[in-house]
Image (spheres, rainbow, N blue to C red):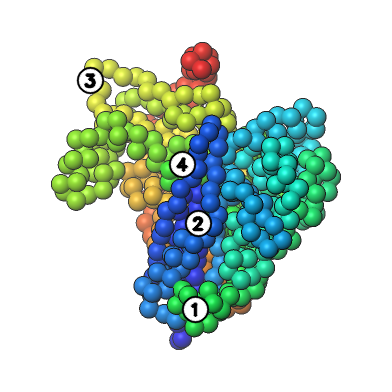
Amino acid sequence: MERLYYMGIDVGTTGCKTVLFDQKGTAYGEAYREYPVICTMPHQAEQDADLVFALLVGTMSEAVSKAGIQSVEALSISVQGDAVMPVDAQYQVLHPVILGMDYRPKEQCMEYGKVHDEWKLYEITGQPLHPIQMMAKIMWFYKNRPQIAEKAYKFITYAEFILHRLGGEAVIDDTMASRSMGYDIRNRCWSGEILKTMGIPKEKLSEVRRSGSAAGKMDRTLAEKIGLHNCPILIAGGHDQPVGAIGAGVIREGMAVDSAGTAEVLSAVYKELKINRNMHDCFYSCYYHAVPSLYFSFAHMQTGGILQRWYRDAFGHQEAAEAEKLGRNFYEYAQTKCTDQPSSVLVLPHFNGSGTPLCDMDSKGAVVGLTLSSTRHDVLKGILDSLCYELRTNLEAMQRSGIVIHELRAVGGGARSPMWLQTKANVLGAVIRTMESKEAGCLGAAVLAAAGTGYYSSIEEACGSMVRTADCYEPEPDMRKRYQEKYEIFLELYESLKAVNRRLN
């Protein structure tokens, strides 16, 4: 059988990666580049889009060279959500990208909420009023950079920007559009009613195209620059969470993916539109999955790996030195010092405020239950336990919203930690599977590319051939009971400390 190659690209907040896969999902060459986030004032998070694209081209060239190939059938892209940039008619960037994590549009959201019905906004768009959203960023431009806003031909995301720079059509895929806070989730179009209330002209937004549909071919000069003898087909990709879910094979109702990196994200898919008060109050978006006829929601926890990094930098100097001597990963080594039982101390992991379902940025982290016999390893295990408890609160909040989860798959850096995964299985009472490919975003994009060109008849068929699970972690009945007792106490922590944290602020 002739081997065909598909390029999966993942453009994240702090770095981009390119991986080449064949039609069976086997990885060949890959490359990664980091880039900065510009933060020179409170709440600002900007980026140089031209630099990001230049570095992305570097990863493409290196991946092709490492794979030793000269032809790629198609490529697709997984991109960070909610980043917005104004461009002129030639798609030259007029202002640095405003990233999703830029909270300066908070004022615009507050002003909007005073005049307009937030629930109606959610009913139409499936998005809660929040400064992270694309339309909040555009409102910020009209308020704070009016000359640039008026001059702009379009406001675009990385999805359109990269497709255009690669030589294709500057279209936004429906996963990105439907989480913008300006898209009619039921009628599949930009909402004229909502955009009018925001003062955003519809003509300033891109044409919407389904994820997985063709959007042109790569520019020949660029293809030659990265070492290809052909011009790959460009396939519209999607928001990084749905595309990563595809890379984990999460393509049916009842499935979810737990992506544990710097922060932690729990993403679930379902068949019927979920627009209800509990979803709204928990700040859960409802938007399109990249798989046709499925919807997508995710819970976002502010801390994950970053809290373990805090432990390393504050307490883990001895383990860091020992791990370096042994040539081992710090986190893996430090966790061997921990008990496999629930920790004797309890941690509230709100070291950067709380994510969903509370979304209380005034909440603070806490370590309670310390005694003179407590060790730093009790604190580390307490951190791992707390992250699992926080994950469970979101899983249960989703279930109250009507989103049922039967199967959980793990990706990201946390999927390399057996202790963390086993603790999750025990806390959640769920079977957790890891994936053979750790690059879920890139693999998901490659799956879209293979299905989009017709090599596979559907995304589901492509996943069946390209996506494979690895290890399986099952709940241990005795441990499940012990963690349940601690979880019930954990649920009281936030309310018990809420008033104290308000006073600390």
- Element carrying mark 2: helix
- Which corner quadrant of the image does residue 308 belong to? top left
Q: Quote the CA–CA distance across marks 3 and 2.
A: 52 Å
Depth check, front residue: 80 or 294: 80
Give percent across and percent down for residue 438.
Answer: 41, 58
On the image, numbered disc 2 is attached to which residue? 51
Q: Amino acid at mark 2?
A: Leu
Q: What is the CA distance from the residue labelled 1 to the residue labelled 4?
A: 38 Å
Q: Which residue carries the number 3 mark?
A: 373
Q: Is residue 80 above or below residue 479?
A: below
Q: Is residue 94 above or below residue 318?
A: below
Q: Which mark is residue 224?
A: 1
284 on left or right of 182:
left
Between disc 3 and disc 1, the foreground one is: 1
Q: CA distance from mark 2 to mark 1?
A: 20 Å
Q: Residues within 10 Å of mark 1 (few under 14, many from 20)?
A: some
Q: Is residue 165 visible?
A: yes
Which numbered disc, 1 or 4, marks the residue closer to the eye? 1
Give the mark nearer the N terminus: 2 vs 1: 2
For the residues bearing labels 3 and 1, Cβ distance under 8 angstroms: no
* Nearer the camera: disc 3 or disc 2: 2
Q: Earlier in the sequence, mark 3 or mark 1?
A: 1
Q: Are marks 1 and 4 in contact (CB under 8 Å)?
A: no
For disc 4, the marked residue is 263
Quadrant position of residue 139: top right
Q: Along the horizontal axis of the image, is 246 left or right of 120?
A: left
Q: Residue at x 70, y 33 (%)?
A: 109
Side of 380 where 90 appears, left or right:
right
